[in-house]
Image (tube, coloured by chain):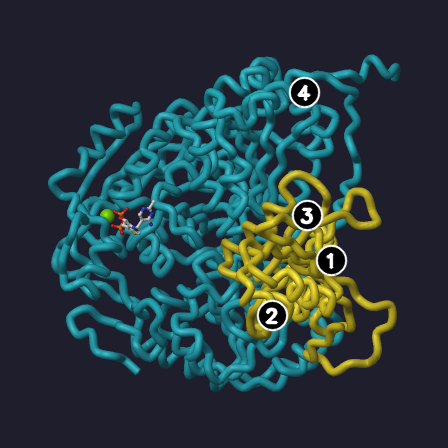
Amino acid sequence: MKHTISVLVENHFGAFDRVATMFSGKGFNIRSISIGETEIVDISRMTIVTEGDDQIIDQVVKQLNRLIDTIKVVDLANTYHVERELALISLSLHKGSMEQIKNICDIFRGNVVDITNKSMMIEVTGPPDKIDAAVNVLAPFGIKEMARSGIVALKRGEQLKIQKKDNITT
Amino acid sequence: MKKSENILGGAEIFFECLRREKVEHIFGYPGGAVLKIYEHLHDVNFLQHILVRHEQGAVHAAEGYAKASGKVGVVLVTSGPGATNTVTGIADAYMDSVPIVIFTGQVPSHLIGNDAFQEADIVGITRPITKHSFLVRDVNDLAATIRKAFYIASTGRPGPVLVDLPKDVIASKCEFIYPEDVEIRGYKPTYKGHVNQIKKVVEVIAAAKRPLLYVGGGVIMSGGSQELAFFARENKLPVAMTLQGLGAFPGTDSLSVGMLGMHGTYWANRAVDTCDVLVSLGARFDDRVTGKVETFAKNAYKIHVDIDPTCIDKNVVVDLPIVGDVKHIIAEIASEMPNPPDTEEWLSQINEWREECPLVYEDNDGRLRTEFVIEKIYEKTKGEAVIVTDVGQHQMWTAQFYRYNHPRSNLTSGGLGTMGFSLPAAIGASFAVKNRPIISISGDGGFQMNIQELITAAANKVPVKFIIINNSFLGMVRQWQELFHAEKYSFTDLSASNPDFVKVGEAFGIESYSTDNPKEVDSLLDKAFSVNDRPILLEFKVVKADMVFPMVPSGGSISEMIVKRLNPKRMI
Ligand SMILES: Cc1ncc(C[n+]2csc(CCOP(=O)(O)OP(=O)(O)O)c2C)c(N)n1
Ligand SMILES: [Mg+2]
């Protein structure tokens, strides 16, 4: 199963490498990883999407915790949380395709961020499955290049009682 | 004190920190990037620096020192090749959870990343094999970093910590402030076990019919041997030990079933296979112990006590985990035990197995065998020596035939299985232990892997007894070739290419003897034990093609245990 794991790490030299080395060294897989600042100056947040059965995820969380540079590790799979991702998608333009792409972009509440005679770049943000959907619909127009940010996620303010192992995201 | 009086250079801060960490020995080798440190070392008198002849030797020596004493072993080497030469030793210390701190020189900060002369990204290279590592970028951070390094290496599950010291940082000055307390927000080892879990363990053990303690090196590291002995004896619980666990419980105690696992005793492995409650104490369900995990202790309710949460449910899913310091947890379990379980029948069953298939060897053809040599060493030392083995058949035979009375007496490379460990590790141990004999036991192959350290032993007059078990083969590999690789003895026969070990020893200035006669073993050992102010070397030329049994083939079940050579029939 897919799990989104949120990790607070020391914002210093080598912390990111240590996490990445741990994943590759232990043979755990990383679907996406993002890192950025938090509200605290010297702490960064890494959001890692990984995959595995319960035993593997248990090991991933423990191994992350074991690193000296990690301060807090939360498997968001058992929480109500918000996940967002941003994608930049550059598409080739053909006769009449511009209008169609613009329409799709609107449906996904995306923005056109760059345009030339031959190509057009749009920006879409949202939950990862929305990005997947946008990519699927846009694919037939010819995606020239794409960059996805990887997921960022935060726990919701209120945690209703939830069944363990339900993966609840919104 | 006026502020200006407290301004120190990096090298002075370095030694001031070592003094406060109560470091008395460092194992090292100089070079360009650490010249400033060596300049100051010249006038430092609170510690002894031992000059090795290869940086790998320094790390193994520090490991031997740490394993024998429980203190942190310290290594100091230069940048580039000096640093990369430490890698095998660091990996070894990581696998066996040995507390050491490795200081490596580094090129000046402004040259890092430039492929400068003798630059190596040692922090990057060793990241997966250190508990933690630091690159010190500012002399103002030096003292706090060294403090943290020692703290991390020695607490929780111990391990190697590397501190990389750029040349300019060591050459700079700053106010020396030694932090008394260490606060690392991401590192808070759990020491106390969960109360309810402990209660549950007590209930389960009290109700057990066939309980077995499965004891690893963690018990020794936590200093929990006395607690273990009390707990096992009060409750009549048999004790099986891993290779690293040997010494945690006296090998001569009737409750000891010896080593379990691939080359464990027949009765220990039968006990694991049959027990109804398995209590793992400071052990990690390593594949050399479990064999096929699906069938390991298949009928047992499994309890796992370990300070490292990642060890739990890693290889074998257990029924009841407790995270914490094994010494305290054993003491708590022992104090809560209502009445001992009735294990009489179980113990006599184990004894039947012991008699059914004891550890035996051929001893009436007049030829010299390793087992005989080990038994003789045991006889002479009565289990009181510190035995430092290398890796191979001699290591397994020593584990089977030497019975340790004390913890920190069996020093060996278990996790990584590093040939070349014994010789330097024994030298290191000799600086920590003064009142008991230190015996290094190596094979003819492994002895040559850090043979250069013989001069370190000779120059420092360490009273180590270097014993070479010369079977003219990379014996353990030969054994696998015979059993599993169609008897293709590919590149394991050293008979035509081994050096004359007596001449080698003598060239290093070490009194050396050799024999292939069982009748001479006594007198040679007596000679060795009469020498206590310098090293001595004994070569025992043993039969070539012996094999270590019992053996559970890699990844096999206990039921596939091979107990004898000529008739490798399945025993169970
Ligand atoms: C550094 C290293 N290289 C290779 C091996 C693989 N290996 C394991 S045991 C062994 C043979 C050891 O031979 P020897 O030192 O003569 O000991 P014996 O088994 O004969 O007692 C080898 C090559 C190893 N463990 N370590
Ligand atoms: Mg050999």
Query: Does the image show residue B12?
Result: yes
Could you tell me which residue is drawn at 25 percent across and 43 percent down?
B444
- The dot on residue A137 is 2
> Which amino acid type is shown beneath numbered disc 1?
Asn
Q: x, y percentage for residue B390?
A: 35, 47
User: Would you place residue B153 above or below residue A160 in this image?
Assistant: above
Q: Is mark 1 within 8 Å of ligand 1?
A: no
- In the structure shown, which secondary structural element does the residue marked by tag 2 occupy? helix
- In the structure shown, which secondary structural element does the residue marked by tag 1 occupy? strand
- In the structure shown, which secondary structural element does the residue marked by tag 4 occupy? helix
Measure how far apart labels 3 and 4 are at the Cα level.
25 Å
Measure how far apart labels 2 and 4 are at the Cα level.
62 Å
Pick the front one: B45 or B533: B45
- The dot on residue A111 is 1
Q: x, y percentage for residue A62?
A: 63, 62
Residue named by callout 4: B10
> Which amino acid type is shown beneath numbered disc 3?
Asp
The crowd level at tag 3 (other Cα within 10 Å; few <14, some 14-19, many 20+) is many
